[in-house]
Image (cartoon, rainbow, N blue to C red):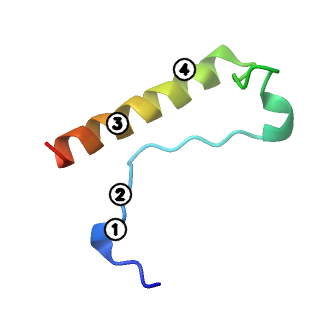
């Protein structure tokens, strides 16, 4: 499969989570509230972009 530019969405933000295997609690949430907030914001930005593209 060849990926063309129209198949890719690049977000200007990024978030890395060091030692991800230890970063989550039993409910799948990040233990660090700041990291959880950053990931939720990233997801909200992606949802907003997708909504605009498909409206």
Please tell me which residue lies in front, 54 or 39: 54
Apparent side of residue 21 relative to residue 5 in the rendered image (left or right): right
Q: Earlier in the sequence, mark 3 or mark 1?
A: 1
Across and down, in percent, residue 22 comes to 86, 32
Q: Nearer the viewer, mark 1 or mark 4?
A: 1
Which quadrant, please, contains the C terminus?
top left
Q: Which residue sits furthest bottom?
A: 2
Q: Earlier in the sequence, mark 1 or mark 4?
A: 1
Q: Earlier in the sequence, mark 3 or mark 2?
A: 2
Instruction: Give above or below for 55 relative to 32.
Output: below
Graded by Cα atoms within 10 Å as few (under 14), some (14 to 19) or many (20 or more), the crowding at tag 4 reads few
Instruction: Give above or below for 10 relative to 2.
Output: above
**Residue at image point 47% right, 84% down:** 1
- Residue at disc 1, secondary structure: helix
Q: Earlier in the sequence, mark 2 or mark 4?
A: 2
Real-space CA distance between mark 1 and mark 2, rounded to the nearest whole angstrom: 7 Å
Callouts 3 and 4 close, C-beta under 8 Å: no
Across and down, in percent, residue 47 comes to 34, 36
Q: Which residue is mark 3?
A: 47
**Residue at image point 43% right, 84% down:** 2
Graded by Cα atoms within 10 Å as few (under 14), some (14 to 19) or many (20 or more), the crowding at tag 2 reads few
Q: In the figure, residue 35 lies in which quadrant?
A: top right
Q: Which residue is mark 4?
A: 37
Q: In the figure, residue 4 lies in which quadrant?
A: bottom left
Labelled disc at residue 9: 2
Q: Which residue is mark 1?
A: 7
Callouts 2 and 4 close, C-beta under 8 Å: no
Real-space CA distance between mark 3 and mark 4, rounded to the nearest whole angstrom: 15 Å
Real-space CA distance between mark 3 and mark 2, rounded to the nearest whole angstrom: 11 Å
């Amino acid at each position: 499969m060849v990926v063309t530019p129209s198949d890719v969405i690049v977000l200007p933000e990024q978030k890395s989570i060091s030692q991800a295997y230890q970063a989550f609690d039993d409910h799948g949430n990040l233990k660090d509230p700041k990291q959880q907030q950053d990931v939720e914001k990233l997801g909200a930005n992606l949802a907003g972009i997708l909504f605009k593209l498909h409206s």
